Image (cartoon, rainbow, N blue to C red):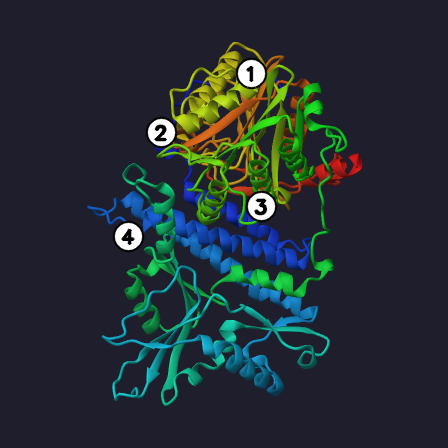
Amino acid sequence: MTTAPTTPKTPVAPVSTDWLDRDLSLLAFNARVLDWAKRPDVPLLERVRYLCIVSSNLDEFFEVRAALYSSIEKPKAAPDAASAKAHLNLSEVAHALVDEQYALYNDVLMPAFAKEGVRILSHGERNLAQHRWVKSYFDREVRPLLLPVGLDPAHPFPQVANKSLNFIVRLSGKDAFGRDNEIAIVKVPRSLPRLIPIPEKLSGKRQLFVSISSVIRAHLKDLFPGRDVGQFSQFRVTRHSDLAVDEEDVKNLRTALRKGLVHRNYGQAVRLEVSAGCSEHLSDFLLQQFELPASALYRVHGPVNLVRLNQLIDLVDNPKWLFPRYVGSFPHQLNPNTSIFEQLQAGDVLIHQPYESFDGVLAFLRDAVRDPDVLAIKQTIYRTGADSVLMELLREAVQRGKEVTVVVELKARFDEEANINWAEKLEYIGAQVVYGVVGLKTHAKMLLVSRREGRVIRRYAHLSTGNYNPRTAKLYTDLSHLTCDPKLTQDVETVFNLLASQSKIPRLNKMLIAPFHLQRSLIEWVDKTAASAAAGVASRIVLKMNTLTDEKLMEALVRAGQAGVQIDLIVRGACMLPAQRAGFTDNIRVRSIIGQFLEHSRVFYFASGDNEVLYLSSADWMNRNMLRRVELAWPVEDVALRTRIVNECLVAYLQDNVDAWVLDGEGHYKRVQAPKTRAGKLKEPHSAQAALKALYSAKV
């Protein structure tokens, strides 16, 4: 993949203002995801799914990132003009993105469903028979679960849980005690479905639904007998949800986190969503209650929680409106009828998920669990899900008498509860469970098997760019690497010992590890490539990752580009490095691939002349990954496997002209169009993901 050297330019040292804004870049990523919901070539229910994905992503953005702009930690001094402008710009972009979502929902998607006989009926659209059915449903299923709270000194504003559906109502007339308290709150239980199918006998040949908010809205007066319901609105508050635990000051991290989970739903408010028609009186009242500025208010033309629209996909369940079901093939390098250990003795194995299924990883662990010669199994767990075959296999290993050590990362955001539960179950049956290193998240993905073979104990390892989660393995692109390389597996053993004993780490053979030397080593590789380019050697860097925000690494890339290295960055999400800015990053190109599968693999390729090195990694190029997490990067030295990774994970994506977007020097993304021939005709479109699906289907 090397290219001709470029004449080096006089270096321009980057300063902080040269970088793009991280949060604006995150919002730009969500705009690219939303584009899939706009595409008429995407099946209708899948367009709804992408709309919901954006809403879920925005929820997490506000729960985590927006806290930086809220009053969680009130500044001692007023923000400077630059910070205030950045906050205002961020708010404007977020509001515009939300407005775009609801415009797409109301003006495009719902009319498209209506043409197909699928409708979510509002109160005014229901006929008399449907009104009667909804009234019966409300009385039977909804009203018994509602408890309206009229506000007065004895009934203060109730605790409103994070992202829950609620109604605020303004009443006239006097209450049962002759008082004029006019505001009431109705909390809607999460147990109630957000969409309810209308019976077939009342729907004709159509599929009709009503939303729970519409059902409650139509019967608010029934909740307040003797009072007149005036103004009202549904509302939803988003709260800061990043758990903060002082790990240095707690005796038991698991216990402290479990206590923290109880309070997560009631953190500092950061966003308020209300119906578009909500009166200023009610919205101002809510903003005051939640101590939010006006910029935190989002007036929406539709349900305040588009994420729950996911239920429509399951309720309609029409295959013609879904992507064709895709099932990855069993890894083509593996023979399911032969011992995996024998196969690994013949050479390393690479699994490209989801084109090849996660079943290969499960087969490796299953063989280890049931092989009488296997003595010990060690594994890291970051996100594995609440219902995991993999975790059940580890439990079986303990019951079969093997030594099982599991490093469980309890602080995996929004997976804390599932990980705590698995840790307790494994400890209960006798597994050795450790929680990594205080102050660091263990994000490395590794599995080590120790097996007696004659007079020696041989190690086998699985290393991955992604999580040990069978469900997401069907949706995320990742690379799994199986090996019995003595030096690499010794490194894996060393890292496990570090996590358990926290003793000083010795020099590793091949592996790079954060927070110790991963960042420094990557900078060294970038600088070595830059030195080769400066000496006139054709040099190339191609990096694939999810996020690029680490300033030291970006500075190194800028130096390398200015030295003449041709640099291609495939960054799915946030990227703070501007591309091809004149006199600064002329030789750096950035593209983002947004496809049917979530791009998740991390591949780092450096080439100088005929010399090339390729690393796989669990880490993105972010400061937190380099300095506040335990992360791994390891070389792929097998020439055939390295060539396969280059072709499938780099070249294919650099040639994509269907799902690719390119970044410019000002932070704007533009969708790539298929190039034209000399005759002016469009060349054959190329989607990397579609090509890989076809490639692996042909291998079956």
Q: Which residue corresponds to mark 3?
A: 388
**Do the residues under discs 1 and 4 have CB atoms within 8 angstroms?**
no
Q: Residue at x 69, y 69 (%)?
A: 115
Q: If you read the primary sequence from the N terminus, does the residue marked by circle 1 or circle 4 appear first?
A: 4
Give the total of numbered labels.
4
Residue 15 is tagged as 2
Q: CA distance from mark 3 to mark 4?
A: 39 Å
Cα–Cα span, label 1 and label 4: 50 Å
Q: Secondary structure at mark 2?
A: loop
Give the Cα distance between marks 1 and 2: 40 Å
Q: Which residue is mark 1?
A: 487
Q: Earlier in the sequence, mark 4 or mark 2?
A: 2
Residue behind mark 4? 71
**Foreground residue among 695 and 595:** 695
In the picture, the quarter occupied by the C terminus is: top right
Quarter holding the N terminus is: top right
Q: Amino acid at mark 1?
A: Lys
Pointer 3 or 1: first along the chain: 3
Number of residues whose C-alpha sits closer than 10 Å to that of mark 3, classed few (under 14), some (14–19) or many (20 or more): some
For the residues labelled 3 and 1, the Cα–Cα distance comes to 31 Å
Q: Is 528 on the left-hand or right-hand side of 645?
A: left
Residue 594 in view: no
